[in-house]
Amino acid sequence: MRWMSWDKLSIPKIHRGMGFKDLASFNVVVLSKQWWRIQIDVDSLVAQLFKAKYFPHSDFFGANIGTIPSYDWRSIFSVKNVFHHGARWCIGTGARNPLMGHSWLLNGECITTS
C-alpha cells in the first residue's frame, strides 16, 4: 500500500488534490461561530442558559469554566483565547463575502449604498 503525506492530501481538489480539511482548525471555526452567535443573539435560549449557569454576573470574557461544566460549554469555552487574541475575518476582494443586505452592524442594520 502506498501512503500519501498530509501535504498532498490537503491540496484543494481544484489543484488535483484530495481536498481534506484540517479538522482541528475546522472545529475551532465552528465553535467560534457558536460563541459569536451567543454574543450577538443574547435573547436566544442557548445564550440565556449559558449566561445563567456559567457567567451570570459578567460577559463571556469574564466567564470561568465552572464546576462540572457541560460538554457544550467546555467546547465553546475552549475558543475563548481565539477571541481574546483578536480573531479577524479577512474580506479580501469581497467576491465570496456578501456584505450588502446582511446585518453586520451591532444595531442590526444592514450596509446600504447611497
Image: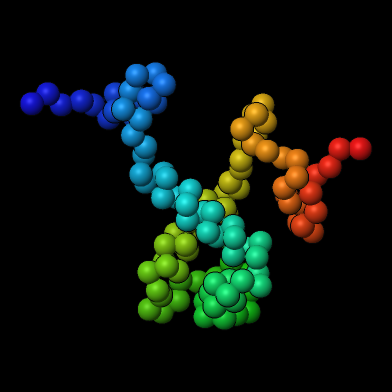
Q: In terms of image quadrants, where is residue 57?
A: bottom right
Q: Is residue 4 left or right of residue 2?
A: right
Find the residue positioned furthest to the left: 1
Find the residue positioned furthest to the front: 101
Q: Is residue 30 above or below residue 77?
A: above
Q: Is residue 45 above or below residue 97?
A: below
Q: Is residue 18 left or right of residue 32?
A: left
Residue at image position (60%, 48%) is 86
Residue at image position (34%, 19%) is 16
Find the residue positioned furthest to the right: 114
Q: Is residue 49 visible?
A: yes
In the rendered image, residue 103, in percent from the top left (x then y), is placed at 73, 51
The C terminus - image quarter: top right
Count of number-bearing discs = 0
Q: Is residue 4 above or below residue 44?
A: above
Q: In terms of image quadrants, where is residue 84?
A: bottom right
In the rendered image, residue 111, in percent from the top left (x then y), is placed at 80, 44
In the rendered image, residue 31, in percent from the top left (x then y), is placed at 47, 56
Q: Is residue 27 left or right of residue 33?
A: left
Residue at image position (60%, 80%) is 56
Q: Is residue 7 visible?
A: no
Q: Is residue 97 left or right of residue 24?
A: right
Q: In terms of image quadrants, where is residue 5?
A: top left
The N terminus - image quarter: top left
Residue nearest the viewer, comparing 49 with 87: 49
In the rendered image, residue 82, in percent from the top left (x then y), is placed at 52, 51
Rendered image coloring scheme: rainbow
